[in-house]
Image: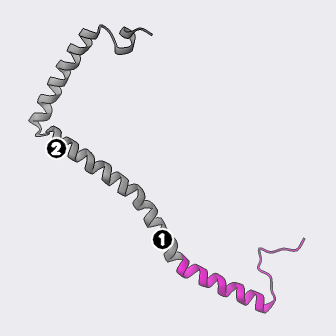
């Protein structure tokens, strides 16, 4: 693979096109009030929120698990104790 294929053409022509496109995008961003410092600040905030959102899901699931277990586990224990005391087998247990 030669360098013309790698970078998309004549290196000087590519550099000039990139410079012109950068100037046009810079003018548009400046008109919108976006500065490099502002842009990096908002990208950092976005990354932090995505990180928090990702781990927030696990935190919510763990909270739901604990909340449900507070109700389900005691009922399950009581059902098992009464099943053993009465001598009956739960419907899921079958002799082979």
Q: Using the rendered view, name the quadrant where residue 2 is placed.
A: top left
Q: Where, quadrant-wise, is the C terminus in this rendering?
A: bottom right
- The percent position of residue 44, horizontal first and vertical second, equals 27, 47
- For marks 2 and 1, the one nearer the N-term is 2
| Quarter of the figure that contains the N terminus | top left
Inspect the magenta stretch and tell me whether residue 81 lies in it: yes
Q: Is residue 14 left or right of residue 30?
A: right
Secondary structure of the residue carrying tag 2 is: helix
Within-10-Å neighbours for mark 1: few <14, some 14–19, many 20+: few
Counting every numbered tag in the picture gives 2
Please give the range of residues in magenta.
Answer: 69-96
**For residue 34: magenta?**
no
- In the image, residue 31 lies at what x, y percent? 9, 35
- In the image, 13 versus 74, the foreground residue is 13
Judging by the rendered image, the residue that carries numbered circle 2 is: 38
Q: Residue beneath label 1, please? A: 64
């Amino acid at each position: 693979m030669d360098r013309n294929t790698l970078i998309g053409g004549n290196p000087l022509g590519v550099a000039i096109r990139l410079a012109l496109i950068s100037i046009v995008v810079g003018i548009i961003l400046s008109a919108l009030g976006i500065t490099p410092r502002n842009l990096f600040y908002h990208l950092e905030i976005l990354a932090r929120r995505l990180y928090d959102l990702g781990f927030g899901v696990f935190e919510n699931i763990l909270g739901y698990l604990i909340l449900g277990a507070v109700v389900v586990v005691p009922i399950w224990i009581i059902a098992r104790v009464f099943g053993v005391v009465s001598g009956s087998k739960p419907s899921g247990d079958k002799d082979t």
